Amino acid sequence: MNIFAPIGRAVLTLLAQTGRLTLFTVAAMTSIVRPPIYIPLIFQQMMRIGYFSLPVVGLTAFFTGGVLALQIYIGGNRYGAEAIVPQIVVLGITRELGPVIAGLMVAGRVSAAIAAEIGTMRVTEQIDALTTLATNPIKYLVVPRLVAAIVSMPLLVAVADSIGVFGGYVVATESLNFNGAVYIKNTVDFMTHQDVNSGLIKAAVFGFIIALMGCYNGFHSRGGAQGVGTATTNAVVSASILILAANYVLTSVLFQT
Amino acid sequence: MAEQKSTTKVELKGVKKRFGSKVVLDGIDLAIEKGKSLVVIGGSGTGKSVMIKCVLGILRPDAGRIYVDEQEVTHLSGRARDQMLRKFGMLFQGSALFDSLPVWENVAFGLIQGRGMNRKQAREVAIEKLAKVGLTADVGNLSPAELSGGMQKRVGLARAIAADPEIIFFDEPTTGLDPIMADIINDLIVTTVKDVGATTLSITHDMVSARKIADRIAMLYRGKIVWEGPTTEIDRSGNDFVDQFIHGRAEGPIKMEVRK
């Protein structure tokens, strides 16, 4: 009957969620610098987050670079500016598409996996078991994933940038009749440090978002298989939205003139 | 309640906990004497697990105090809590083994991560503890997922006793096991606990198990302790709640809660 009740409930839920996430983030961040630090776990997670994401990120980057070359050629053609393809491909890939495509792919792959794993540990009381064995679950589970994601994402994006540019090169030389050597020279001459660096900074932030959303949603999952399923979905959705939002904010901060 | 002597190992005073509007613990007073085994019985959803989690600091009680070795531990955090937790071992209802680690590393986990023992030495301790619960060394290399429920319980028990804790908690140790395996686990609990001389708190609704492992029994209903006494007196407690529970009658003062 009371129309304010559902509104109030929604607002309270939102505030509670925000508060919980903030506390979780602070706990995770302060745990990063305090011992014990589980170095082997960080490397293990870097393998899972970074190395095993290479095929999917590489393939998406390749096709993205290819389609980018194709569209720029078509668009440029209308103004007789089709020779601009290598410059715009490298700009688009390094600044935006490399980090964003890699971020979204890794969000789907890794956020989900982290949320499902930690969520299952939560509902089967494995996280409580860690506590009773005098091991801080934030330090043991969250910190290695956060650190690994923050370190591996820029590496992954560096690879994605190269493959993306290569995708554009293949399409341009094979079907658009560009000269290979000229294409590469134009790419290298045009590209600046800032183009690449800004993309790598974005990648590190996206890595943080990916791991944080996976861990947070997993940690707070409730109620068996369905709860873990919900946590996994929430992790992917929230990580993807936050990546795109953060991308806008970062772009406006990094390229303000 | 138990007399206030220096032998009290764990004590709860007026512990309250609620989730939203649902009151789960409504002022629990309970004391466990050193080296004794207390079993808390009660139906599903009466707050038995919540009580244990409050003592371990996994949940924060809303009111009341908890003492371990006469030190208040209610609001400990960080390193002080880790120190306190080193006195504890716990066997979880579903065993809660880490499925990413082999069996021996599960048993040795508290030694390696909690106490910084080197892996080789920890592995030897783990194999020795596995032997205590009737498992051979080659089981140590298996993954927990490859074991049956009863075997997982044994591994969970080995993990609980691995660091020779002073206090061990058992959360529904026999739930989900066949009667024979349940009896084996009960025997193991009795013998292993005697071995390490630990104080234990168990929660269960399995009366066979309670009678076997308890020195004293307390009954929890609606967030309160409604009866507490020696195991030998459980059949003449004169308490309607206890009588209904131990005889498993549908009719009586206990009304089953629908919601958790």
Image (cartoon, coloured by chain):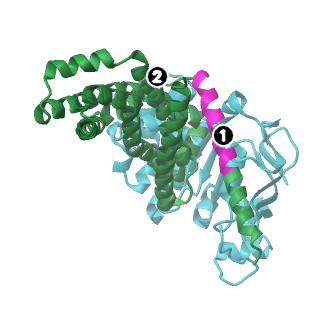
Chain colours: A green, B cyan
Quadrant that contains the N terminus of chain B? bottom right
The residue located at (46%, 40%) in the rendering is B132
On the rendered structure, is B157 left or right of A90? right
Residue A212: within the magenta?
no
Tag 1 near tag 2, CB within 8 Å:
no
Q: Residue at x 69, y 45 (%)?
A: A19
Q: Is residue A193 above or below residue A248?
A: above
Could you tell me which chain the residue with mark 1 belongs to? A
Which quadrant of the structure image shows residue B255?
bottom right
Question: Badge 2: how crowded within 10 Å, few (<14), some, or many (20+)?
Answer: few
> What amino acid type is highlighted by mark number 2?
Ile
Q: Nearer the viewer, residue B233 or B241?
A: B241
Q: Residue A161: horizontal and vertical position, in percent?
A: 32, 27
Name the main secondary structure of what is drawn in magenta.
Answer: helix
Q: In the rendered structure, which segment of residues is drawn in magenta?
A: A16-33
Which residue is more in the foreground, B234 or A22? A22
Residue that appears at 74% across and 62% down: A8
Q: In which quarter of the image is residue B7?
A: top right
Residue for badge 2: A39
Q: Which of B104 and A182 is in front in this view?
A: A182
Q: Marks 1/2: CA distance? A: 25 Å
Tell me where residue B52 appears, x and y as whole percent: 68, 50
Residue ID for mark 1: A22
The chain that hosts pointer 2 is A
Dot 1 and dot 2 within a common chain? yes
Q: Which of A97 and A71 is in front in this view?
A: A71
**Could one spot residue A182 in this view of the protein?**
yes
Compared with A152, B230 (above or below) is below
